Amino acid sequence: MATEALEHQPSLDSLCKQVSTIDDHIELVAILNRKGRVVEMIARDDGVNRDLTAHKREMLFMEFVLQASMNQEYDDEFGKVKGLILQREKISAFSFQIYDHVLVVITKPLFEPTFLQQRIKELIFDQIN
């Protein structure tokens, strides 16, 4: 699987750029490796990224990767996770497993996040297939 991800590495940069332009509410798009390290990231200067210290951003990204890893434990019983939505008072966050990477999208709070989640999933599918 790692080889497969490396073959698609150039498309991760493109995917990150394309996702960042889907909606005006998007403040940060990051593609993370299995260790929670940033492979690609686009963030608005006036968005959530300015509110996070480098350490807190790193911890947040590791949390998304850990959650994705933990969710794989149940793939045989329930199937693969298609995406996660986290809603907080000040943000909505989405995460998607792409090979051995995790795509994280953080937006301003959304009333109905499933519409944006679906648009991102379609873009991912188009990009990696």
Image: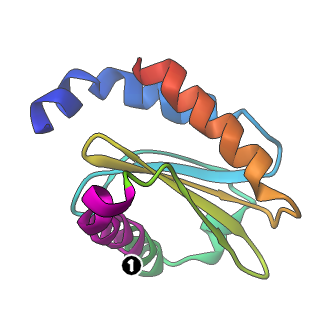
**Image x and y of residue 78, in percent:** 38, 60
Q: Is residue 45 left or right of residue 6?
A: right
Residue at x 73% of width, y 71% of height:
91
| Residue at the farthest right position | 111
Q: Residues within 10 Å of mark 1 (few under 14, many from 20)?
A: some
What residue sits 65% from the left and 76% below the top?
51
Quick check: can you spot residue 3? yes
Prevailing secondary structure of the magenta residues: helix
Magenta residues, as a range? 62-78
SS at mark 1 in the image: helix
Which quarter of the figure has residue 35?
A: bottom left
In the rendered image, residue 70, in percent from the top left (x then y), is placed at 29, 72
Q: In the image, is 56 to the left or to the right of 6?
A: right
For residue 81, side relative to residue 100 (left or right) = right
Q: Position of residue 5 (x, y in %)?
A: 22, 33
**Identity of the residue drawn at 28% across and 24% down:** 8
Observer-nearest of 72 and 89: 72
Residue 113 inside the magenta-drawn segment: no
